[in-house]
Image (cartoon, grey):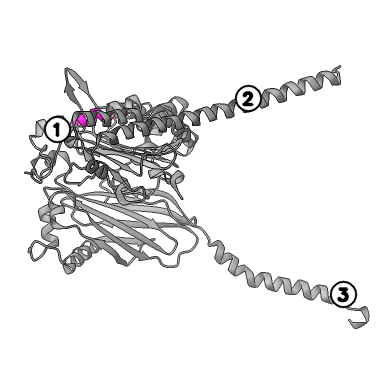
Amino acid sequence: MRSPYRIAIATIAAVSVIVAAAAAGRAQRGAATGARADLTARIVVAAQGVLTTLDEAERARVQFPFDGPQKARWSNLPSPMFQRTGVRLADLTSAQRAAVMTLLSTALSRDGYRKVVDIMRGDEVLRTTQGSGGGGRGGGRGPSFGENEYYLAFVGAPSATAPWMLQFGGHHLAINLTLAGSQATMAPSLPAAQPASYTLEGRTVRPLGNENDKAFALINAMDASQRAQAILGYRVADLVLGPGHDGRTIQPEGIRASALATPQQTMLMDLVHEWAGIMNDAFAEPRMAEIKANLPNTYFAWSGPTTNGSAAYFRVQGPTLVIEYAPQGSVDHIHTIYRDPTNDYGATFTAK
Amino acid sequence: MWGGVSSAHRRDELLQAARLAIDPDRVQLTLDLTPGIAVAQSVLSAIDRDANGSISDAEARAYTEEVLRAIALDVDGTPLRIELADRAVPPIDAVLRGEGTVRIRAAAALPRLAEGRHRLRYHNGYGPDIGAYLANALVPASDRIVVAVQRRDVDQRDLVVEYTLRGDPAARARAGVPVGAAGALVLIANLWWRRRPREAR
């Protein structure tokens, strides 16, 4: 027979464990929030590191008001087909340029930074093989390719607490990282590539190779019934929600992730991480958790052949996520887009 | 020279991206037409009809009307009249650079539809020789519309959206007011009758 004394002890112990677990959870969340706020502070220091290298005219060129139109001024097109503003790498000294790259390496994950650099180097390959571009301002109206043709802008003043955006882009690249204290989003952003594969110093570089290979692995991991749901019966020629299509949500199509087996869901999340994980791990982690929480209502759609090496379009769409991968007529020219229909440009945490 | 663009971006197609927003009483159509650089001149010749190097308002209107004439919308087989709501035609040099997009916004009123399943059909017959098409239904703004399925031909020139129209809760509430009022009157009359002194009955 249990004594009241033992029951009381057991109850107190159980309550203590629950309280301790809750406190630990709060502490963990608090620590994670603190780590993200610290990261923002480090990004701000790196951004100020860029600003201190610029002269007054350059500082005026790089800085834009947070509530102005600059936020939405990004494109996949090369300059000057799309006229970018901000400071252009070609106009910077090596020290200034180094400060910009330090800022990017601080704000992005290791893989994200590598992806950005690989895209830029790919454009340099395009410049040398196409024999065009590099003309710069006033040097003709042709498109300017190459790793010098990327622009940095700060939309809002870099701040550890107030909202601002780090905008970096050029041909086939738009990184829009909105920060507000411990919160951050990289939606919308556009990583793209042409050529999609090139050789640099004896090494084959595929800026979006993981995205391609993981998607083909996923579609090929599906059984016939799953594929029948995932594969769209029509051609998709381009991004549906590319540049200029902010604030639109299309009806989702394809297979629902709830119809996938657990290993297939893991593959889908791994694929999504190729985009969500471009920003620094501290910010990517809560973003991935949010996407995972919405996984049952997330869809995967495919258009095209399922043999790797073919040009195929795919889309991942959930309540807070849109990813599109759209080959432009060949496997060597890829456009992609990453969006959060609920939080593009940090709408949820920058609203006044 | 624009040679570099040739391999950098879509060059020989006229991308026509359509988005359909279905409301209970109308359909809104947004159509973006972006000519690739190799077909820009032929598309421009259809816009700048007097070839004077600039696009007048009348030319812009004529072009958008020509495009809309090639678009067909019907609901449950009943053709819908498409009305132009707004248009934006880019400068000629932007089109020639391959960055110009003609934006057309149009709308079609829907007939009064019964609650239940309906079928909206969209057909784009414009520029079939050079067209590359996208057609998508947007997530409806009204919770009375639930899109069930979208079906397309392989080129996305044809899109069929099957959707369910739910009843209007506000209309139901409005319809319920007279019934409720009548019921309340009957109840009050009944109570009054029962409370009358026995001798008064």
Determine crowd level at label 3: few under 14, some 14-19, many 20+ residues with C-alpha closer than 10 A: few
**Same chain shared by disc 2 and disc 3:** no
Span colored in magenta: A116-122
> What chain does mark 1 sit on?
A
Give the percent coordinates (x, y) of residue A328.
21, 39
Label 2 element class = helix
Label 3 element class = helix
> What chain does mark 2 sit on?
A
Secondary structure, magenta segment, majority class: helix
Kindly give the residue lying farthest to the right in the view shown: B199
Q: Do the residues labelled 2 and 3 touch (CB within 8 Å)?
A: no
Q: What residue type is labelled 1?
A: Leu
Label 2 vs label 3, nearer the camera: 2
Q: What residue type is labelled 3?
A: Arg
Asked if residue A203 shows in the view, the reply is: yes
Dot 2 corresponds to which residue?
A21
> What chain does mark 3 sit on?
B
Dot 1 corresponds to which residue?
A126
Dot 3 corresponds to which residue?
B195
Q: Which amino acid does label 2 sit on?
A: Ala
Residue under the point 52% across and 27% down: A31
**Residue A328 position (above or below residue B96):** above
